[in-house]
Image: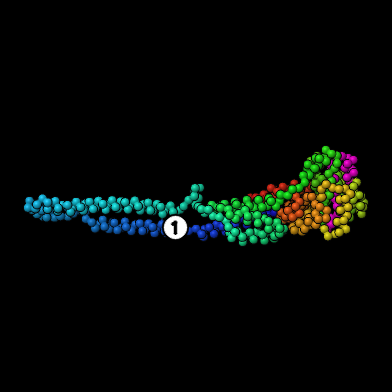
Amino acid sequence: MFESLKKKFSGAIEKISDKISEEEDAASPEKPTSDAKGATTSKKTETPIATDETTELKIPRTSDNIEAVPKKADKNLEDSSEAVPESKKSSQFSIFRRKSKDEKTEEEQVTLDDKVKEKTDSKSSEEATPEDNTGFLSFATHKTISDKDIDDLLFELELALLEGDVALEVAEQIVNSVKDDLVGRKIRRRSDVAEFTREALKRAISEILIVEGPDIKSMVQNARKTGEPLKIMFVGVNGTGKTTTISKIADHYVKEGYTPVIAASDTFRAGAIEQISHHAEKVGVKIIRHQKGADPAAVAYDAVEHARAQKKELVLIDTAGRMQTNVNLMDEMKKIQRVVKPELVIFVGDALTGNDAVDQARKFDEAVGVDGIVLTKADADAKGGSALSIGHVINKSIIFLGVGQSYEDIIEFKPAWMVEQVLGD
């Protein structure tokens, strides 16, 4: 059910998430570049160390110098030690002490350079793999979604919705709502984009679907208390499933403990009276009928009087299917409305007809004033455009959805259920 619509929204979420992620990746420095920089830094740090090592090799160590002096030289030195003054002797050995001190200084310098190298390598390694507090590689410090990030993708979404039989004004409102919700939002990781987009779509669709409508259950309960039956007239074009829908609703309220009566006011179509009579018998509901060609308003009036006399809570009035452009049949429907004064006028539309159902609902609303909507064949509707659009366009709530051929295949429409159908997992 509504598979096409679900795919369109899922595709939009994925595209927006991918585009913003790609733009952020392109704007951020690439990791290999950072590694290269780190390597360069490391090499630069190593350069003075190599020089120091070379210097160290060139400087003779004290112990090595002493061992390198030939024994003959040592003997001559000893022999002449008496002739050399004490100050001069001290001067000669001070050379070795200075060299030993210089060597120690350079060894300390090498050690210090090694520590600097370790710190530099450690820092460059950390810069190459930054992590956020959650332990995942960071996506963005604070990426802010802008108009240019999503304008093209939202335009594609709008076109996709129009292809899915979503009314133009509804498609525009969804796109504008999502845009207003997303632009200016700050994101920190890739998953945020998909999450924010999904939530924005949920809010946009909920705003479209939530329309104040009648509470039929409360009205039927009040009818039981007052003794005045609740009168509901069903209107719509030929072939939308009005007769079957009336039978399903009758069965629904029988199971709720109420006692409906059906008025066979479609006296125009051949076989209509026999069809509704068959369904009434199947669900165990009384039917009021006249001969074919009789006055539809008279049939409806008799059904209301029967309900009052028998203390029945609900009168369901069938009418002839007619195109919204058929003036004579539309006038006939208005006559029924004047005679029995129904509390509710329900438009029955075929979900498979898409935008045609929306146009039909608008025309019937202008002619007799529609209070609620029943969409039939919703189980076979892959697009879902009419279900999303029809209530918003005429500002009337969807009350029931027909979802199969059996009498029990009718469900009360809930906006949250519809949102879950098109955006759920």
Give the farthest residue toward the top: 225
Q: Is residue 411 visible?
A: no
- Total numbered circles: 1
Residue 326 lies in quadrant? bottom right
Q: Residues within 10 Å of mark 1 (few under 14, many from 20)?
A: some
**Residue sitting nearer the eye, 70 or 91:** 91
Q: Looking at the picture, does residue 296 appear above or below residue 160?
A: above
Q: Residue at x 10, y 50 (%)?
A: 86
Q: Secondary structure at mark 1?
A: helix
Q: Residue at x 74, y 55 (%)?
A: 393
Q: Residue at x 29, y 52 (%)?
A: 109
Reply yes or no: does residue 130 show up in magenta: no
**Type of residue at label 1?**
Ser
Q: Residue at x 86, y 59 (%)?
A: 327
Q: Looking at the picture, does residue 359 appear above or below residue 425?
A: below
Whether residue 49 sits left or right of residue 97 in the image: it is right
Whether residue 203 sits left or right of residue 337 in the image: it is left
Q: Is residue 131 visible?
A: yes
Residue that numbered label 1 is attached to: 34
**Residue sitting nearer the eye, 381 or 335:** 335
Magenta-highlighted residues: 303-323
Whether residue 369 sits left or right of residue 80 in the image: it is right
Q: Position of residue 389 (x, y in %)?
A: 72, 55
Q: Position of residue 93 (x, y in %)?
A: 15, 52
Q: Position of residue 289 (x, y in %)?
A: 90, 48
Q: Looking at the picture, does residue 127 appear above or below residue 261?
A: below
